[in-house]
Amino acid sequence: MSLSIAKRGSNFVRGVIDMSDTVAIAFVDGISSISSHNSVHRIVCYKLNAGGQPEKSVELLIPASSLNGFAAALGKLRS
């Protein structure tokens, strides 16, 4: 990993990557596990690699207070 310089206001900060304008994008073929601990729900998703084997794609951490809204939004999807 290379050292990056990000500008914050009028100061340059060594080694800081400003990701405030970025959005994570991940391809998901399926869900490998779901767990819950301390009112946080964890969904681990996978994608299939070129050899057809599953590999971890993304891990979602959803607070319990947001779970109903998240599930309702997923329920609106149609294939």
Image (tube, rainbow, N blue to C red):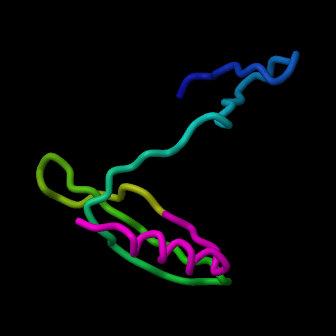
Magenta part mainly helix, strand or loop?
helix
Instruction: Please say whether residue 65 is one of the residues in the magenta stretch.
Output: yes
Q: Which residues are magenta?
A: 60-79
Name the image quarter holding residue 65. Answer: bottom right
Q: With respect to residue 64, does 26 lie above or below?
A: above
**Residue at left 85%, top 21%?**
9
**Observer-nearest residue: 76 or 59?**
76
Q: With respect to residue 17, does 58 lie above or below?
A: below
Q: Is residue 59 left or right of residue 64?
A: left
Q: Say how many tags the image has.
A: 0
**Residue at left 47%, top 69%?**
73
Q: Is residue 48 left or right of residue 36?
A: left
**Residue at left 69%, top 31%?**
18
**Observer-nearest residue: 74 or 30?**
74
Q: Position of residue 10 (x, y in %)?
A: 88, 16
Q: Is residue 10 left or right of residue 68?
A: right
**Observer-nearest residue: 13 or 68?**
68
**Residue at left 31%, top 61%?**
46
Q: Position of residue 29 (x, y in %)?
A: 25, 61
